[in-house]
Image: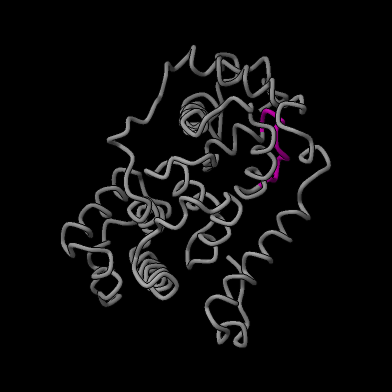
Amino acid sequence: MPTFSAMAIMLPVALRTNQVTTSWKTERNSRISSSMQLPLGSDPRTEILRRIHAALIARFGRIIRPPEKRRDPVWTLVQGVVGARSKTRISNANTDNLLAEYGAWESVADAPVDELTDRLRTATFPGQSAQRLKACLTEIREQRGEVSLTHLHNLPIEDAMAWLESLPGVGRKISAGVLNASTLNRKALVIETAHCRVMQRTGLIPPTADFARAFDELMPVLPEEWAAEDMDEHHLLAKRLGQTYCRPKQPDCASCPIRQDCRTAGQM
């Protein structure tokens, strides 16, 4: 998340947001290699991703998120903010419980931090999650006049992600999730720990790439025919692989369905 000086914080919201967007784009563009300037499909990694995707489907079957499982963008944002280092089922339950108890996200934004901390006591970091959640929802309301993310539907992906990542507690994983896994259903590849590990070990991204670098490396080389739903499925499949075969320690390289396209197969 960008670091603001005291002077920057006092700037009008519109100007501050514009500066955040410009800074984000500048930083992002400085990391993009020349290969990322090529049209979709021209990078050899594109065909590797197609093969990996097919191999994962052959091993695990299709993992398609049904429409009824896609939640409102604000719900998805809240789930990400309160879910740091927590299991998905816990962060899902906490998000549902908050909305059920308070009735509206505006009411959650108005709740005292201590009260939110108590409501999030099953989270891994309840105090931190409560502070970030309140700050995030408050910032959205200050900028938009209400706690709503409907404006993201028509923004270019880069601008939408930059806006989201200017919010407290929101990084690349959450911003991509809001755009791709919610009812917005937009083209943005979600990358979390297990997925990132798989991509690092295959050699498709640098071995030290974080979520933001992984996103910047992979998005331009995804198969051009992939829709938003395909990107979502690819993430879920890669995550499944990282949790079963491509584990952090003692990975099962011998049985891995993508070992033919992995540079480190058998070396871990």
Q: Over which residues does the magenta segment extend?
A: 201-209
Say whether residue 13 is left or right of residue 81: right
Image quadrant containing the C terminus: top right
Work out whether residue 185 can be spotted: yes
> x%, y% of residue 54?
55, 15
The residue located at (59%, 76%) in the rendering is 16
Which residue corresponds to the image point at 68% horizontal and 19% vertical from the top-left? 261
Most frequent secondary structure within the magenta stretch: loop
140 or 14, nearer to the observer: 14
Seen as rendered, the residue at the extreme top is 58
In this view of the protein, can residue 131 be seen by the observer? no
Magenta span includes 202 = yes
> Is residue 141 placed above or below 121 in the rendered structure?
below
Q: In which quarter of the image is the N terminus?
A: bottom right
Looking at the image, is 70 positioned above or below residue 144?
above
- Say which quarter of the image contains residue 246: top right
Q: Which of 195 and 245 is in front in this view?
A: 195
> Closer to the camera, 218 or 227?
227
Image coordinates of residue 216 in percent, x first then y, are: 67, 45
Percent across and percent down for residue 91 are 32, 50
In-front residue for pair 176/13: 13
**Image position of 86 with respect to 191: above or below:** below
Residue at image position (43%, 72%) is 139
| Residue 167 forms part of the magenta stretch | no
Q: Where is residue 78 in the image (x, y as percent from the top left)?
A: 36, 57
Tell me: 27 left or right of 257.
right
Picture colour scheme: one colour
